[in-house]
Amino acid sequence: MTSVIAGAFGAHGLEKHLTPHQLDVWKTAASYQMVHALLLAAISLPGANLAGRCAFAARIFTVLGVLLFSGSLYLYAITGIATFAMITPLGGVAMIVAWLLAAIAGLTAARTARAPAS
């Protein structure tokens, strides 16, 4: 929901106030936020059967990644303060870790589901 609001705000509320580069930065933040909201939903649905440390860590890293990556880009787009953009790679790393952990959790769940009952 918040990524849709941010995208709409950028497209309709900020278009007269930001440069084309700043709007592109804003759009990138909203896009990554949306994709990672979908990841978070996918790894949090009860039917996904993702439990354990990897799944929990994947959820934490997804949220952390969105806050750092998208949050820093939103702040950079609005303020033009380059220091905010220097935080963005930390969020990107957190997002990469989240995807890796989600994949491990998914593979673990698939293996567990196929394992014969003892």
Image: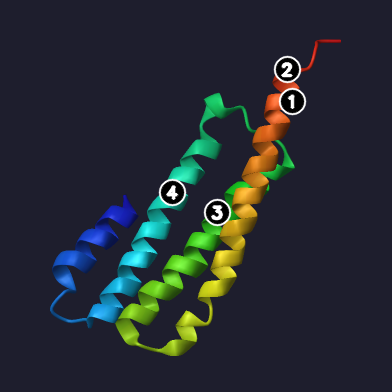
**Residue occupied by mark 1:** 111
**Residue occupied by mark 3:** 62
Q: Quadrant of residue 91?
A: bottom right
Along the polypeptide, which appears first: circle 4 or circle 2? 4
How far apart are labels 3 and 2 at the CA level? 27 Å
Along the polypeptide, which appears first: circle 1 or circle 3? 3
The numbered mark at residue 64 is none
Within 10 Å of disc 3 (Cα), the crowding (few <14, some 14-19, many 20+) is: many
Along the polypeptide, which appears first: circle 3 or circle 4? 4
SS label for mark 4: helix
* Residue drawn at the location 19% of the way across and 65% of the way down: 11
Q: Do labels 1 and 2 touch, CB within 8 Å?
A: yes
How far apart are labels 4 and 2 at the CA level? 29 Å
How far apart are labels 1 and 4 at the CA level? 26 Å
Q: Do labels 1 and 4 touch, CB within 8 Å?
A: no
Along the polypeptide, which appears first: circle 3 or circle 2? 3
Within 10 Å of disc 1 (Cα), the crowding (few <14, some 14-19, many 20+) is: few
How far apart are labels 3 and 4 at the CA level? 8 Å
**Residue occupied by mark 4:** 37
Q: Nearer the viewer, residue 1 or 93?
A: 93
Which residue type carries mark 4? Ala
* Residue drawn at the location 29% of the way across and 80% of the way down: 21
* Residue drawn at the location 29% of the way across and 79% of the way down: 22
Within 10 Å of disc 2 (Cα), the crowding (few <14, some 14-19, many 20+) is: few
Q: Nearer the viewer, mark 1 or mark 4?
A: 1
SS label for mark 1: helix
SS label for mark 3: helix
The numbered mark at residue 114 is 2
Q: Do labels 4 and 2 touch, CB within 8 Å?
A: no
